[in-house]
Amino acid sequence: MLGRVRADTDYIEAVSGNEMEELIANLLKWEGAVSASEYLAVDEDVPVHEPDVIVDEVAGSDTVSQEEEDQEPTIQPATALRHCMELSAFLLQCGEQTDRERRALQTVAALVRETTVKAKRQRTMHDFFTCTTYFFN
């Protein structure tokens, strides 16, 4: 029966009543009598130990724990520079009593600018090797 259906290769065509009855009769004969262990070499008496909790052990020194990640929020240099400029404008509005704070803020802003410039100048390893091959060729 399956050979006839496969030979036709027309799966849209409806299955005739006789073929459907034949298929149902074959399935009823196999019901409960066929087991996967008959086809596969399965030993049902072998105990299988599965842990209650899956332990995922990550090895490496570059991993960051959740506590460390929560303690150190990451701020982009451009955002830090914008906050420095806003704070500088606020200190200017406060008057002459904030000279010491403005000088300290200028030091911080210079450090942030330097970090921003370094970040822009950083290149990938591919760029590094591409540039060095030009020098040696």
Image: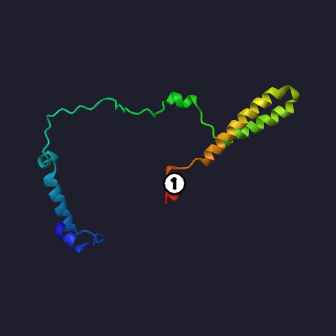
Dot 1 falls on a residue whose secondary structure is helix
Residue position for label 1: 132
Count neighbours of disc 1 (C-alpha within 10 A) and say few if under 14, some if 14 to 19, many if 20 or more. Answer: few
Image height of 89 relative to 1, above or below: above
- Between 100 and 33, the one lying in front of the other is 100
In front: 110, or 56?
Answer: 110
Quarter residue 23 falls in? bottom left
- Give the farthest residue toward the front: 136
Placement of 79 over or under 11, stated as above or below:
above
Front residue of 133/116: it is: 133
Locate residue 52 relative to residue 109 in the image: left or right: left
Q: Residue furthest right?
A: 96
Amino acid type assigned to the residue bearing label 1 in the image = Thr
Asked if residue 30 is positioned above or below residue 88 in the image, the reply reads below
How many labels, in total?
1
Residue drawn at (13%, 39%), measured in percent from left and top? 43
The figure's colour scheme reads: rainbow
Q: Position of residue 122 (x, y in %)?
A: 58, 47
- Image quadrant holding the N terminus, namely bottom left
In the image, is residue 77 above or below residue 52? below
x, y percent for residue 115: 64, 40
Res. 54 image quadrant: top left
Position in image of residue 19 (x %, y %): 19, 66
**Residue name at image x 31 percent, y 29 percent:** 52
Residue beneath the point at 74% across and 36% down: 84
**In percent of the image, x 16 and y 54: which residue is there?**
28
- Residue 101: image location, x then y, percent: 78, 28
Residues 51 and 100: in front is 100
* Residue 110 quadrant: top right
